[in-house]
Amino acid sequence: MTSTYSLTGLLSTLLWCSLTAAAVDTAPAQQFLRAEPNEAFAGGATTYTGKVDRNVLSHPSANISFERRLDFRIGDSVFRKLWVSSPSSTTASDGLGPLYNARACQQCHIRDGRGHTPESAEDNAISMFLRLSIPPQTEQQQRLLEQGRVGTIPEPTYGGQLQDFAVPGLASEGTMTIRWQEQIVTLADGTEVSLRRPDYSVSNLSYGPLHPQTMLSPRVAPPMTGLGLLEAISDNDILSYADPDDQDGDGISGRPNRVWDSQQQQRVTGRFGWKAGNPTLLQQNSGAFNGDIGISTILKADPYGDCTDQQTACRQQPHGNTPAQDNLEASHTMSELLLFYTRNLAVPARRDINNPEVLAGKALFYQTGCHSCHRPKYRTGDHASMPEQSDQLIWPYTDLLLHDMGEGLADHRPEFSASGYEWRTPPLWGIGLTQIVNGHTQFLHDGRARNLLEAILWHGGEAEPARNQVINMSSTERGQLLRFLESL
């Protein structure tokens, strides 16, 4: 009995010590004179520490085994694959569309980085598109939304998103149109900053008018950085930061999006997408495959992508579902390899973490309360299917929760639990490398912000107090804050 009790006590002590250590290494910073232990390794042992160039976001997890590197490279080839329309001479690459936004994942997530708004009237906006939906029109649609089995009701003719490309012989759906209006924000020191406010519409519609209640939501392709690590964060850790009723009185009331997991057939915590509308990377990948490229997968077997029943010519086109690909266009193996690739895109190491300007900016980041939503760090859980991402101290700067960002950023389009004012806190790791990787500095869900300061100044709602503190900073302090963000 004594021996059993002692062993139980020892195990309890070890568990308590382990949990205490995890709580300590994920606690908010208390000093800003020097970098925290392991702060340079934003992705833990997965962190890429090599050359910083335009391909810095495209490297595999540093702790990946030699054997699994081959799977990563093959997954990369699936990510880069240019799909073609059916029928073709190969069954491994046909099935494009018939309506689509891009022919490859890489065309939107350029070098695994961030998309951009159209640069001119001739720009096809391939890394940006419009989501479409309408309010429920029937009792059945209302029940599906209330049960959480769907997040939105697609526009009846054009589906869930506007496709601006089509296979030969078929008309594309239409063209996204953006009109910009500049508005001036004057900072406390007299500096004037011009923000561009977008107005979205659709022109050149090929299949008749949109439903009169159509809601539009623009989406720029987000960077692929560290997605497997975000998937490895436990639900409990995410939910521990939720405070929907703001019981602690800090003005921050983050809450999880509750979304439908098509594999588990139940509602779970969302974590991927601009409104956290997908629970897993597999489901996120499958949705993009099907909606953006028109490719059927294990989770979305319809070979016609986003073609609706109203688009009869679209649904009469040849498709690429074939026994050679598991009666799909992207086989189970393709989906698994793409999943492995997207899980193992490494987070680059931080730069200049002990630079005095960076440290001063980090202190300001905490003082303004930015860290309340952009939570700096987590300890990932243990996952047999994700050994590289397991038990890692990571620094993503997100809580993966929904926050009301105010009227300025509102799209007025609900998605599952998310209201038309709410957005998931985007991770900040890698944000300072956007110019190097993608040749621009456009941020937020629709790329309206042309630099990091503009992105901050668009923050409203729960983030308005932090935004106002930035407005009242001296130019030196603002420069330090931006220097810190650029080091991420």
Image: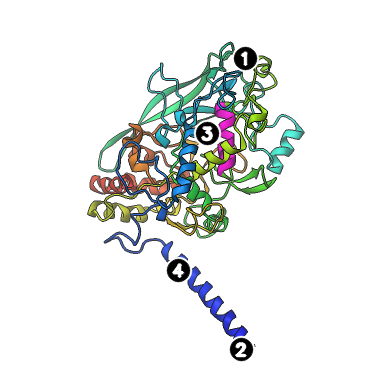
- Which residue in the protein does label 3 denote? 411
Kindly indicate whether the residue at mark 3 contacts the one at mark 1 (C-beta within 8 angstroms): no
Q: Quadrant of residue 376?
A: bottom left
- Residue 207: image tag: 1
Farthest residue in the bottom direction?
2
Q: Amino acid at mark 4?
A: Ala
Farthest residue in the top direction?
169
- Which residue in the protein does label 4 denote? 21
Q: Mark 2, mark 4: which one is toward the viewer?
A: 2
Magenta segment boundaries in residue numbering: 281-293
- Which residue in the protein does label 2 denote? 2
Calculate the distance from the C-alpha at mark 3 to the C-alpha at mark 4: 41 Å
Q: Nearer the viewer, residue 45 or 151?
A: 45
Query: Which is nearer the N-term, disc 1 or disc 3?
Result: 1
Q: Which element type, helix, strand or loop, lies under badge 3?
A: loop
Residue 44 placement (x, y as % from top left)? 41, 55
Q: How many marks?
A: 4
Farthest residue in the right direction?
139
Q: Amino acid at mark 1?
A: Tyr
Residue 281 placement (x, y as % from top left)? 55, 43
